[in-house]
Image (cartoon, rainbow, N blue to C red):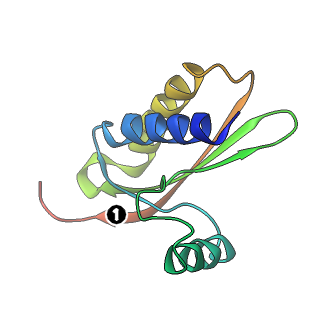
Amino acid sequence: MTISQDQGLAADIENAVRAVPGVSALFRAGTLVDHTIDAGARLTGLRDGSAPLIRLDQATDALRADIAIGVHGRAGAVETTRRAHEAALTAAAAHGPDRVEIRITVVHIDEAQR
């Protein structure tokens, strides 16, 4: 995949996950090292703030997407994560990779009444 294809895929996955009932927010995915590198790239102007929040990694045999979400407390983290996973797989399949691995991490439970 090219950079523009990766960005298009990441944007499509982001939009699909944001549309899932129960998802309150998306957060930048990745490790502490990834966040540090990303912050440095934004500070030096190498990357702008519009970069996708989803982290894509093209392994030799699969495309891996790391997604970090917030969940509305009343929606239930397990069911919301399951629906977000299905939405991400569907969005990725539209781009045609043979094998996709989706890893979703719930990083926040929003207890506010909605």
User: Depth check: 10 or 111 in front?
Assistant: 10
Q: Quadrant of the N terminus?
A: top right
User: Helix, strand, or loop for circle 1?
Assistant: strand
User: Depth check: 107 or 28 in front?
Assistant: 28
Q: Residue at x 11, y 54 (%)?
A: 114
Rendering coords of residue 82 (x, y %) = 48, 37
Three-letter amino acid code at the position of disc 1: Ile
Is residue 56 placed above or below 28 in the rendered structure? above
Q: Residue at x 58, y 38 (%)?
A: 4
Rendering coords of residue 52 (x, y %) = 48, 52
Rendering coords of residue 78 (x, y %) = 45, 46
- Residue furthest front as drawn: 45
Q: Residues within 10 Å of mark 1 (few under 14, many from 20)?
A: some
Is residue 46 placed above or below 4 in the rendered structure? below
Q: Which residue is mark 1?
A: 109
Q: Residue at x 37, y 38 (%)?
A: 15
Q: Residue at x 50, y 34 (%)?
A: 88
User: Depth check: 42 or 34 in front?
Assistant: 42
